[in-house]
Amino acid sequence: MTAVPSPVLRPRRSCLAVPGSNPRFLEKAQGLPADMVFLDLEDACAPSAKEAARGLVVAALNEGDWGGKTRAVRVNDWTTHWTYRDVITVVEGAGARLDCLMLPKVQDAEQIVALDLLLTQIERTMGLDVGRIGIEAQVENARGLLNVEAIAAASPRLETLIFGPADFMASIAMRTLVVGEQPPGYPADAYHHILMRILLAARAHGLQAIDGPYLQIRDPDGFREVAGRSAALGFDGKWVLHPDQIQAANEIYAPSQSDYDQAELILDAYAHALSAAGGARGAVMLGEEMIDEASRKMALVVAAQGRAAGLTRTSAFTPPER
């Protein structure tokens, strides 16, 4: 039996953005319960602060205690003159303590290939394991969305596709100034097509899909509503901009305890049904539901997500008497 690939790589339910130019935030972020922290050299750094921020980021990676979090750095996009120096400084200075580089405003596959090549050269020069540092691609404009499938297939380093809502909304002239909220006058979900395009490309290539930030940091109900939209579709996590958003993201993008327990029961029940002791059947009843191979594939995803979130089972499977 061939298992379907799990969408869970390194957990990224909550992806905390930290300005790379702010030493206080760089220190505080180390103790917060986010799954992932990315140190930002792009939008969170003023142009005049970018060069100094590189050194602060390298020091924070090397000297900080990140407690098992996934550690990433968002570099500037390839249309700027900062990108190559961001990559060289960070990877040469702290490559052994870095999990991923995040590339913003990705418009085509060639931009991912270029970053992959540069990373490979630095890794070989510095004696680092070639290919260990992953890439996250941020889709933030119309061209990037149209090319998202090619982007997803561009490099074996690629781990994640990220939706960047603010720049995307500007790129298509969406008529709202509130990032992530529905534009007034549109009666449906204006983001459904965008999110599904990103999600389908990610899943087709075994990647994670991450939703972008919700900027109204003092509106927890709004955050939960927007996050719940992408979580329901199957996204793995969401950016958080404030410590108060972390717990909500960790809850929303993890399965509930009851769903996790049910997924584990389905896996056990179906494995038993396929065995000789269970009658070598391809379908079996579990309570009031018939389960089969498709049920197993769905349960694998939920079970993997629950395990990654640290959930433990509260029920056990008991084989039925024959």
Image (cartoon, helix red, strand yellow):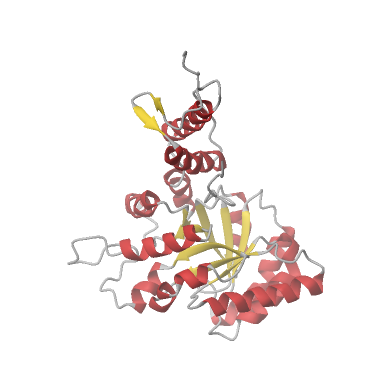
Q: Which of these two is toward me, 250 or 54?
A: 250
**Most distant residue in the top direction:** 321
Instruction: Name the image quarter holding residue 154.
Output: bottom right
Note whether 262 is above or below 5 in the view shown: above
Look at the image and tell me whether residue 240 can be seen. no
Residue 84 located left or right of residue 195:
right
Q: Residue at x 58, y 52 (%)?
A: 9
Instruction: Name the image quarter holding residue 307.
Output: top right
Residue 219 located left or right of residue 95:
left
Residue 271 x, y percent position in the rendering: 53, 30
Q: Which of these two is toward me, 302 or 122?
A: 302
Look at the image and tell me whether residue 50 can be seen. yes
Q: Quadrant of the N terminus?
A: top right
Counting the numbered discs, the total is 0
Residue 304 x, y percent position in the rendering: 53, 42
Q: Which of these two is toward me, 113 or 181?
A: 113
Residue 243 x, y percent position in the rendering: 49, 52
Residue 297 located left or right of residue 133:
left
Residue 275 x, y percent position in the rendering: 55, 26
Note whether 264 is above or below 227 in the view shown: above
Q: Residue at x 26, y 60 (%)?
A: 189
Note whether 246 is above or below 166 in the view shown: above
